Image: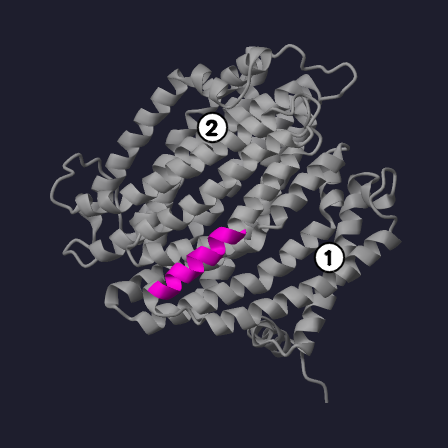
Amino acid sequence: MASIGRASAMLASGTFVSRILGFAKAWLLVQAIGTLSLAANAYGTATSVPNSLYAIIAQGILNAILVPQIVRASVNADGGRAYINKLVTLGMVVFAGVAVVATVAAPLLMTLYGLRGEQAQLATTFAYWSLPQIFFLGLYTLLGEVLNARKSFGPFTWAPVINNIIAIAMLGGFILLFGTYSKSGNPHDTWSIGMIALLAGGATLGIAVQALVLFVFWRRIGLRFRFDFGWRGVNLGSAGKAAGWTFGMLIATQIAGLIELNVSNSAGEGYAGSFVMNNAWLIFMLPHGIIAVSIVTAYYTRMAEHAHRGATADFRADFSSAARSIMFLIVFSSATMIVVAFPIARVFTSSFESFGLVLIAYLVGLVPFSLVFMAQRAFYSLGDTRTPFLFTLAQVVVIIIGVLACFSVGPEMRAAAVALVVSIASVIQAVLAFALLRRRVGGVDGRRIASGLWRFLLAALAAMVAGAGFLVLLGGVEPGAFPVSGVVGAIVSSAVVGVVMLIVYVGFLAIFRSSDLEAGVGPILDRLRRRTPHSG
């Protein structure tokens, strides 16, 4: 377990640095184009399209099949090198083809997301610079998952740091050359090609470097990439069969995402739309990326190895350990961020009310979202992509029905209502996913997981009461109050409330005699004791 802990810590540290830089990038972007402007929703929609298309062709499919397939191929005489080169070559061809077609179809894609007139024209121009990201996002995931399958976790996690540094530099240059957005006398009423190229092209450049730098680390794991178009004879057919269900799952989720964007964009200029939702989702993903993704990535290869050997007991033990580790940290993170959602939003923009409401609505679903991620990887390690399709289809149905109902919600609350529907669907999906996994492997240590969860939730509730009380003492979240008076007040207030909530959370878990608290905090206390010199 020590190796799992070290791998998780390394992944978490890289993700933490990347996410902090991602915060800085998002903050600069808001300063550059605002949150409720015509350009903000145009840019938000244009940059969400490559991520949506990339998710369909790459992210889920590769995560579902690549690690298990490489683990199985590693028993070949060449250690799986031929398989890897063929798969990467095939992936690059597919990614390049989709990127070209999507770029040519940019005007059509923008109209599909509910944009019209001048906003659609601006979004289309942004999209011409953004859609090539599909190729580089796919390549990054493909190369990174090969490294992960070979238990080289660091490069995949730290490469986004380079991307964020480049993007921050580009945004800094944009602000220096063209100024920041302001409601009075907006300097960006007329967008030149240079402005668009620097903003959207700079983002694409960062992602390209993020992908290409991973080739450098292949030699360290004994691989050397060569194009190989001989795709027969290496069992790619089984990979394609596994990918079929995942492809269907991702098509369904993107249909739901398309409806979400159309409904949120329907609120119109001056109200929260796709750009606010994208930035709220970025904040939502911070604890998920640092905690859940790091823990699951470290366990994923091991679970695939257990499944390949038929070691069901070891598989269940790893799943239970990973799920409880995720809940211990994610429940606290969700509770804390809900309490300080408005100060967090104020860090980004003075229009913090709508931003904060969207963030709270998303955070309601953070715990089930992370647990679904864990359950999906468990099924993938078993070579089962059909079951994740089924419980994701249930989620998609709930989202589509609920989001369409949000047309009846006023424009000032519409984006938050959409986010809340997504969270409710995540709860339903998590319950269904765990039930199906329990049936698939004959149990998931459910009693122990549930026992940990109720302790985490009660401790988090107590922490929320204490945190909300301190937030009120600091002035509350009314306009002009210290916690939302500016960036400094928001950061200080969030930090103070976070420390208070951490003390209360840990204290209540100690009162409840949580074994997961001892497992999580024990190694840290032992290390501190070893470093503390003994007196006497």
> Would residue 243 be found to the left or right of residue 524 on screen?
left
Instruction: Name which residue lies at 52% across and 65% down.
Output: 325
Residue pointed to by mark 1: 498
Location of residue 300 in the rendering, given as x and y in whole percent from the top left corner: 38, 58
Location of residue 358 in the rendering, given as x and y in whole percent from the top left corner: 66, 39
Quarter holding the C terminus is bottom right
Residue 416's place in the image compared with 461, above or below, is above
- Residue 409 falls in which quadrant of the image? top right
Q: Which residues are magenta?
A: 427-439
Cα separation, mark 2 vs mark 1, equals 35 Å
Residue pointed to by mark 2: 49
Crowdedness near tag 1: few (<14), some (14–19) or many (≥20) residues, C-alpha within 10 Å: many
Location of residue 366 in the rendering, given as x and y in whole percent from the top left corner: 57, 51
Mark 2 vs 1, N-terminal side: 2
Crowdedness near tag 2: few (<14), some (14–19) or many (≥20) residues, C-alpha within 10 Å: many
- Residue 74 falls in which quadrant of the image? bottom left
- Residue 513 falls in which quadrant of the image? bottom right
Residue 202 visible somewhere in the drawing: no
- Secondary structure under tag 1 reads helix
Q: Is residue 434 magenta?
A: yes
Instruction: Name which residue lies at 73% across and 16% down.
Output: 186
Residue 510 visible somewhere in the drawing: yes
Q: How many marks?
A: 2
